[in-house]
Amino acid sequence: MKISTRARYAIRMILDIAANSKNGEPVGLKATAERQGLSKRYLEQLAIPLKNATILRSVRGKEGGYKLAKPASEIKIGDITSAVIGPI
């Protein structure tokens, strides 16, 4: 099964946020983009459908960013893929 680039990048983004969120603190997209070698603007576009699907939660402010809306163990690859490209 082939996975689109959009879905692959969304999966990488979620994995990076899960791995780098210490004590539930939000992770900035700029840092995620630098670590993953991806465009920050592209990650911003992916964050919107992931927020709507209640996979991510945004935090505003100077120390803001994104964090997982539920435990990483409850998030499935299919949920991420469906959120960014539609139902499979």
Image (spheres, grey):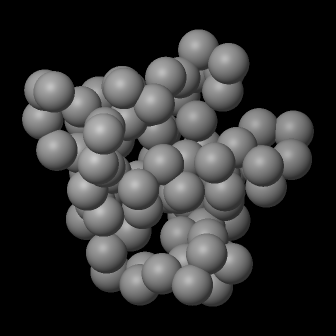
**In which quadrant of the rendered image does the C terminus lie?**
top left
Q: Residue furthest right?
A: 23
- Residue 13 at x, y = what percent? 53, 57
28 or 82: nearer the eye?
Answer: 82
Please say whether residue 47 is visible from this viewpoint.
Answer: no
Q: Is residue 26 above or below residue 80?
A: below
Q: Is residue 31 left or right of residue 12?
A: right
Q: Is residue 49 left or right of residue 69?
A: left
User: In percent of the image, x 58 and y 36: which residue is there?
Assistant: 68
- Residue 7 at x, y = what percent? 33, 51
User: In percent of the image, x 66 and y 56: which residue is there?
Assistant: 16
Please say whether residue 74 is visible from this viewpoint.
Answer: yes
Q: Is residue 40 above or below residue 24?
A: below
Q: How many marks?
A: 0
User: In percent of the image, x 25 and y 35: which residue is there?
Assistant: 83
Q: Is residue 65 left or right of residue 22?
A: left
Q: Residue furthest front?
A: 1
- Residue 74 at x, y = what percent? 59, 14
User: In percent of the image, x 48 and y 81: which residue is there?
Assistant: 38
Q: Is residue 84 above or below residue 33?
A: above
**In which quadrant of the rendered image does the N terminus lie?**
top left
48 or 35: nearer the eye?
Answer: 35
80 or 63: nearer the eye?
Answer: 80
- Residue 45 at x, y = what percent? 25, 65
